[in-house]
Amino acid sequence: RRRDRNWKRWGPYLAERQWGTVREDYSADGACWEYFTHDQARSRAYRWGEDGLLGITDRECRLALALAVWNGRDPILKERLFGLTGPEGNHGEDVKELYWYLDATPTSSYLKALYRYPTAAYPYQDLVDENRKRSRLDPEYEILDTGVMDDNRFVDIMAEYAKAGPDDILMTVTVTNHGPEEADLHLLPTLWFRNTWSWGRSGEGYWARPSIRKGPGSRLDAEHETLGKMALAYGSGPDGNPPEVLFTGNETNAARLFGGANASPYVKDAFHERVVNGRLDAVSPDGAGTKAALWYRLTLPAGGSCSITLRLTGATEKGGPAFGKEFQQIVKARRREADEFYAAVLSKDLNDEERSVSRQAAAGLLWSKQFFHYVVTDWLEGDPGQARPPDSRRSGRNAGWSHLFNRDIISMPDGWEYPWYAAWDLAFHMIPMARLDPEFAKEQLVLFLREWYMHPNGQMAAYEFALDDVNPPVHAWAAWRVYKMTAVRGRRDRVFLARCFQKLLLNFTWWVNRKDADGQHIFSGGFLGLDNIGVFDRSKPLPTGGQLEQADGTAWMAFYCTTMLSMALELARDDPAYEDVASKFFEHFVAISDAMNLLGGNGLWDEGDGFYYDQIHVKGKYVPLKLRSMVGLLPLITCEILEDETIAALPGFRKRMEWFLANRKDLVGQISYMTAPPPAGSGKGTAPPAHRHRLLAIPSRERLLKVVRYLLDESEFLSPHGLRSLSKTYEANPYVLRYDGQQFEVGYAPAEGDTGLFGGNSNWRGPIWFPVNWLIIEALERYHHFYGDDLTVEFPTGSGRQLNLKDVASELARRLGSIFLPDDNGRRPVNGGDTRYAGDPAWKDLVHFFEYFHGDTGRGAGASHQTGWTALVIQCLEETARLRAKTGRT
């Protein structure tokens, strides 16, 4: 019923950062950070979206509602989150604010988020200056390091949204002073329209100038040609007085930024000028504009708290009093429904701490759905109403993607640091999303395969900085997992699976044609998502010359192959035409696996070390890069099981497979075949038929065991908090490659990167990353399904303790989950050594979900709100809770 009434029209779709993005960059050299800065953002109208603080917008980002705040000491009115650009940060771009997503439902019927604002002057310049001084060997300088929030001298600003209907949104803003002294706060809930009228274009998406006017009583009236009429009702402040209402236009202040003339005296930064600088003439006296704010002046005693209420309502919603008893009843009902929703979708075996972490992870995932607008043709051409872009644009970034038309709600990796989609990130997001919002998960996966996203040649768009870069091909895996996770009463969505499969055929063909340089089934994709894990930048020509043959690139393709095979076999149950393509993927996998294990002797396998390595093929020779990293662990994820009952039901596929096995004995050594014995204790004549299945995997049993020894070695990959991305052995003894008079070195860097590769804001030379950890956990479970309890390994290596692979997978999941859980002293590894998170009631229950984690301590690093793929922690915590309930072990 709620979906039919479009309950998703409004949501937390407002970006956290629109400035400094590629789509807002019209520079000649593609320097987006310098072209549109944080300082300019308060004065310059955005072309492709809007950003705000704890805000919401409609799904086309026509009208936005968010907060602005000022503590009476800052140099600017805070309307958006501040952070360092890539060149400013010693480890790349980094938000320098404290905020948390606390709750959300899939329809945004209830939302709650918290922003923590210092009562002293915000240390903008200190953060810039100190980080500029620091090298990549130094830690980042964060807002808590400045001392500005010592003794809890901050104000908490909590925004809650509750829907009474699809276009009836109740907003409560609660402000709490945690400091030891009285604090003043200027709170300005702000309503504004995205600027669609200044670009000289017309048609869909380029609407005429809308308006916001002072209505009767305590109300703002907004009108837009497609959104219709909306009204924002507002209550009085804690002192009983109504707020002062300010109006201006969402227009660029050309006079401030460029020394030009303003078409109107009332421009985007008018509220800053009025509140901070006291300029009465900065705001419109006409009671109208395209941007309006409600200026509440609050004084809070130490420990004091107060709330204001607002209600944004569409003309189609029923009338009635805006506030009063009904308002509170609706808010309470939405909170209760949110509790009921999570009680249903999260495991009942979770304890209180696990449930709290899981719910915050889910909230972050749902709050990170954002409006993303980027039409490459318009961006390349520029707008008739603006200056013409430089000619270099037509041959520069993304020039080959003129078909791309993005104007959708999309799951973002991190709303501030990565306010743009990344194809492989999104695939991982959809695993936890499938539990929360199955239809949205399926819609997102289909969307990225649509013709206005996917390149005509079959390539998937990577991310806006380089749409034609190469992300790991995990979209098929995500579609397959979501397909199985979202079955309703045992019925699976075959239409969804078929839609994905047909387009993935195009993408698979692109990979084969573009990334298998010599036609030998060995792949080299360049970036492949693992950033700086290699000996050198794998996206650029090798300094040694020759061709790089990648263990991870080849493993990704084998993984892609087996997933497509499983999808084809599933679709063939209803349509025999899929049996032919299933045979194609079966044979293609065998060829890739054979090449990886045997090409040129041992392929990418090193028998002496018992590990998979990248290698350089140069001047007719193969030079292995004997660096033990995640590159050599990824071959383990290619592990798919074919059940005989499935094969028996598909005669066309079975016939072709049997012919292949009989006639291509040179290749079939890569397939394991097992007949499982009858269950113990079953009497003769009563036992069921032996369960027969085939394992398609890159490593043989013997090679699997050799790699797993490294995987589970605490001096190599196994950390107390998951699997490291680089062996710890390189901490004391860095890997060195000497070739033709050149030397390249890689050392273990457990947290932030110590190299400038890929901007320095992402590091794969040691930290723990959730996405690849999760793929390995899944693979170990599948190996256990095939080999059973008879295959055990030492855990940890050298301990003498034997576990089957299912138990190993469960233990890895437990270690990942432990990053976020308090120990006996109340300390969560994710928080590092900051003791305020351990015992202070104002801090201890708040959790950030980082991009990656320190390889030894579990401290969070990288982007601080990457609740996209780090939301996989929900799966980890539930596996731990399941095992605890089953065994009684804590």
Image (spheres, rainbow, N blue to C red):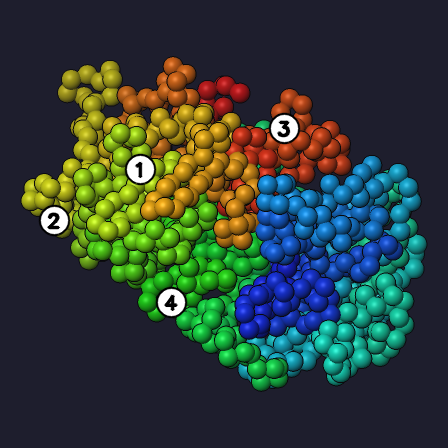
Q: Rounded to the nearest whole Å, what is the CA distance between mark 3 and mark 4? A: 46 Å
Nearest-to-viewer mark from 4 and 1: 1
Q: Nearer the viewer, mark 3 or mark 1?
A: 1
For mark 4, what is the residue?
455
Residue to which mark 2 is pinned: 656
Up-down relation of residue 814 to residue 535 (above or below): above
Three-letter code, disc 4: His
Residue 96 picture location, percent across and down: 69, 49
Q: Amino acid at mark 1?
A: Tyr
Cα distance, mark 1 to mark 2? 31 Å
Dot 3 falls on a residue whose secondary structure is: loop
Closer to the N terminus: mark 1 or mark 2? 1
Identified at 32% across, 21% down, the residue is 792
Residue 822 numbered mark, or none? 3
Who comes first in sequence, dot 4 or dot 1? 4
Mark 2, secondary structure of its residue? helix
Under tag 1, what secondary structure? Answer: strand
Label 3 vs label 1: CA separation? 37 Å
Q: Is residue 277 left or right of residue 717?
A: right
The structure residue drawn at horizontal position 34% and vertical position 37%, both measured from the top left corner, is 626
**Local crowd at mark 4 within 10 Å, few (<14), some, or many (≥20)?**
many
Residue type pointed to by label 2: Arg
Nearer the camera: disc 1 or disc 2:
1
Q: Which residue is mark 1?
A: 612
**Would residue 434 be found to the left or right of residue 506 on screen?**
right
